[in-house]
Image (spheres, coloured by chain):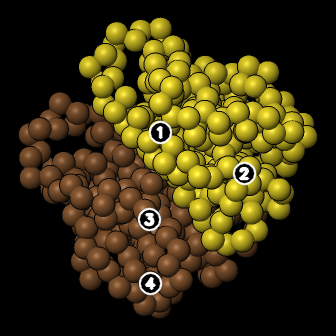
Chain colours: A brown, B yellow
Amino acid sequence: MLLYNSAVSGNCYKVRLLLAHLGLEYETVDVSVVDRSGRAELLGLLNPGLRVPTLVLDDGRPLAESNAILWYFADGSEYLAADAYERAQTLQWMFFEQYSHEPNIAVARFWLAYSGKPEEFADRRSRVMTGGYAALDAMEHHLEFRTFLVGDRYSIADISLYAYTHVAHEGDFDLSSYPAIRAWLQRAASQPGHVSIDA
Amino acid sequence: MLLYNSAVSGNCYKVRLLLAHLGLEYETVDVSVVDRSGRAELLGLLNPGLRVPTLVLDDGRPLAESNAILWYFADGSEYLAADAYERAQTLQWMFFEQYSHEPNIAVARFWLAYSGKPEEFADRRSRVMTGGYAALDAMEHHLEFRTFLVGDRYSIADISLYAYTHVAHEGDFDLSSYPAIRAWLQRAASQPGHVSIDA
């Protein structure tokens, strides 16, 4: 398999983390998340969204969107429940991640730590900080009396939300008032086969 | 079943459309998408994201995120493929919808047609128009030689993207140069059991 990958992208890290848990081998092509020129040429035939991660399976078929890739590989494994309601809840958290979490927390982190020009985004910063903290509030409330996001078992819902939550401080998010999230991050990082984002 | 619903929300319409196709009965509670006060009280225990649609199943269990709800009801029906790769592609298009399409096309439509104060969003408008047209470009390219988004069969991927694409003109998007999208919209609207957004 071939993974069009960015080392700093949390979306790509999700895929690398699940494939590490599952012990699956793959090769990578590095794609910049700063210089986006050439993406149409590189990814146009593989992923209409022109985003990374984009994965090419051994038989040449492409697959895109980080959470769709997680689903493809986790289905049938211990990382995705068999129960229909728990599966829907897993998707609920992954759609929450792409709609309410990533566009705020990942974007704030990118602007501040990776764009090389944080000042250009200064006027849009307060909106993503507010949105990011709202997403963290929702997670904190949910995790207060739970071990993991769905069914009290580590799953791709946790992998999906771990990716950018554990580096939220790079976007200047302060997790000190989120004890349930911090304990959950520790539990996720202690799972068998865990790899760090810079592994 | 009880659907926390907004008549004008495309996200809610997705659920109503699939449930109509499947012939499933439900009751609705109307929730405003303009006045968001009281959402925490109304939805806080049901949906961490405080969004509509939120569905409460007959046994009282809640489910949220439009595309997760679609998956729950479509699985096992003709509206979701059995093949693992086609299922992952279905998710790919639904994540594309929530990340690249809805935050641009639905948001532009809301600001212009439903917010009651489009002038307040004027300075953010060009960004969502650019993003919306990029999403339409991706769909047009994909649909040019295809009947439907996944596996040449009408599925929840089509339902998901039909919802806001067919009302994109309310956000001032011009589909005249998107013939493949316009033909696909017609095919979707002619499916058995189709209901309109204002049905």
Residue A31 left/right relative to B146: left
Q: Residues within 10 Å of mark 3 (few under 14, many from 20)?
A: some
1 and 2 marks in contact (CB < 8 Å)? no
- Crowd tier of the residue under label 1, counting other residues whose Cα lies within 10 Å: few below 14, some 14–19, many 20 or above: many
Q: Position of residue A87 (x, y in %)?
A: 68, 63
How many angstroms separate mark 3 from mark 1 (CA)? 17 Å
- Give the letter of the chain under mark 4: A
Q: Secondary structure at mark 2?
A: loop
Residue identified by numbered label 4: A1
Q: Residue B85, position in %: x, y? A: 63, 71
Q: Residue at x 91, y 40 (%)?
A: B23
The dot on residue B136 is 1
Gap in angstroms between the C-alphas marked 1 and 2 = 19 Å
The disc numbered 3 marks a residue on which chain?
A: A
Mark 3 and mark 1 residues within 8 Å of each other at the beta carbon:
no
The secondary structure type at the circle numbered 3 is: loop
Viewer-side label of 3, 4: 3
Tag 1 secondary structure = helix
